[in-house]
Image: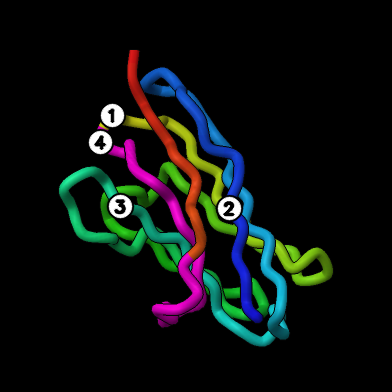
């Protein structure tokens, strides 16, 4: 059974940083592209960033480009999202999933709140 467990969220002031982690289990992690997604209150879930199976290719939504960095450790079955220069509009629940996402694989997510 595939499971993704996100962690690392919290309350941070504008301009601050957070590092999210997503631990995967129940799958051959190292052969799949992975992604981060987020859902703000009242909004649909949206794509944030993706990384290829090897880590050699990354992609970002325009809204986070230059501020967020995705990475992965295939030995640890973990994908990370380093978030810098956070803005109030980054407030959301953040999820990881494969790319393209698999509907049954969504986890609980981790809440990120950017507020002064």
Q: Earlier in the sequence, mark 4 or mark 2?
A: 2
Q: CA distance from mark 4 to mark 2?
A: 20 Å
Q: Nearer the viewer, residue 62 or 20?
A: 20
Q: Nearer the viewer, mark 1 or mark 3?
A: 3
Q: Earlier in the sequence, mark 3 or mark 2?
A: 2
- CA gap between label 1 and label 4 equals 4 Å
Give the residue pinned by disc 2. Answer: 6
Say if 93 sits above or below 73 in the image. above
Instruction: State the extent of the magenta-drawn residues as a range.
Output: 89-106
Which of these two is toward me, 12 or 51?
12
User: For the residue labelled by badge 3, is the local secondary structure a helix, a strand or a loop?
Assistant: strand
Reply above or below: 80 against 103: above
Q: Is residue 104 left or right of 43 when viewed as pictured?
A: right
Q: For numbered disc 4, what is the local secondary structure? A: helix
Mark 2: few, some, or many residues within 10 Å (few <14, many ≥20)? many
Of labels 1 and 2, earlier in sequence is 2
**Looking at the picture, how far across and down is residue 46, in whole percent?**
28, 61
Location of residue 85 by image quarter:
top left
Which numbered tag is attached to residue 88? 1
Number of the label disc, if any, that sits on residue 39 = 3
Tell me what residue is drawn at x 36 percent, y 27 percent.
114
């Amino acid at each position: 059974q595939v499971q993704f467990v996100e962690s690392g969220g919290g309350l941070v002031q504008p301009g601050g940083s957070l590092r999210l982690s997503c631990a995967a289990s129940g799958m051959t992690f190292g052969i799949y592209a992975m992604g981060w997604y987020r859902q703000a209150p009242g909004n649909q879930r949206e794509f944030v960033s993706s990384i290829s199976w090897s880590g050699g290719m990354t992609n970002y939504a325009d809204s986070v480009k230059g501020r967020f960095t995705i990475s992965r450790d295939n030995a640890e079955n973990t994908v990370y999202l380093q978030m810098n220069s956070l803005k109030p509009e980054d407030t959301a629940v953040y999820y990881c999933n494969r790319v393209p996402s698999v509907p049954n694989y969504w986890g609980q997510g981790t809440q990120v709140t950017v507020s002064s």
